[in-house]
Image (cartoon, rainbow, N blue to C red):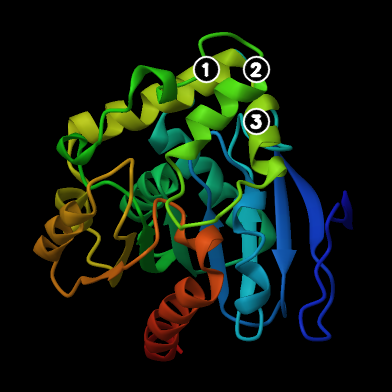
Amino acid sequence: MTVPADNPYVNGGAEATVSSTVPLDDGDIHVCQDGPRDAPALLLLHGSASSTRSWNPLVPLLTGSHHVIRIDLLGHGRSAKPADCSYAVPDQALRAGAVLDRLGVGHAVVVGHSSGGAVATALAEQRPELVTALALVNTGPGLDAFIAPESAAAGPSQWPPSDEQLRRFARTGFSRVGYRIPEELLDDVRGMTLHTFTATMRATRSYLEQRALPDRLSVPGRPLLVVFGEDDRRWRSSSASDYLAVPGAEVELLPGLGHSPQLEDPPRTAARLLAFTAKHIARVD
């Protein structure tokens, strides 16, 4: 099924966002597509307790040169939320690869925000031929980089969570002075089940416990960009330097921004991503 999205974009005269459902064995995956379908593909993967909507402000800045694909990972957004399926990071990556296969996309630059960067890493491990290059946005390289939250911000203590619990939980995701958290981001958490919320959080921790991301990324050998809001309140931004162990990795800190630079300052984030993709898409073409 293909329908216009709830909040369609007008991308410089291009078609509005098209929303569709891709049926997989574990459940339906919600997909959004923007930009020319014959342009180089750019896959955007959101973090835990989020959705395709976490990329909304960034998308119009990318569609001039890209076929932008966003998916709601299983358990999130408008995708299925089964209680009897695995939410492990490698399984989420397998589903992301399957979606690209169904869309007929042979290769893509993959961008992951926060734990979405772990899914992007797993996809590069599993399907290196599918991943042209990787960009990780505020993705902690290992658990030693994690900033333990105050108990009030650790996560909702009841389900469904109260509005105040949601705002305390979401507050550490942003640092830009004067930034107001969009209500739809809080709705994304409300829309999850307690099982999917806790299972996806545990899954990221388990993946990082097994092996740090810089170590994993040395094997696929794909170009790597790491962007970090310098004032991240969830992962130490200084840990971004750990990724320099990956040959050829580019690392950039964005002053004045926190854990979600694609929301806090879309133009600055897009400029860095576009400079990176232009370089590596030209190499593939």
Which residue, given by chain and number where applicable, does mark 1 sit on?
156
Residue 267 location, x and y as percent?
54, 76
Vertically, is 70 above or below 208?
below
What residue sits 62% from the left and 44% below the top? 51
What residue sits 46% from the left and 54% below the top? 260
Residue 177 location, x and y as percent?
47, 57
Q: Secondary structure at mark 2?
A: loop
Which comes before the other along the chain, label 1 or label 3?
3
Rendered image: mark on residue 25? 3
Q: Nearer the viewer, residue 46 or 269?
A: 269
Image marks 1 and 2: residues in contact by CB distance under 8 Å: yes
What residue sits 32% from the left and 60% below the top? 228
| Distance from Cα at disc 3 to Cα at disc 2 | 33 Å
Which comes before the other along the chain, label 3 or label 2?
3
34 left or right of 237 in image: right
> Label 1 is placed on what type of residue?
Pro
18 left or right of 131 in image: right
Residue reaching furthest to the top: 158
The quarter holding residue 220 reads bottom left
**Residue 247 appears in the figure:** yes
Residue 248 location, x and y as percent?
17, 75
> Label 3 is placed on what type of residue?
Asp
Q: Nearer the viewer, residue 172 or 54?
A: 172
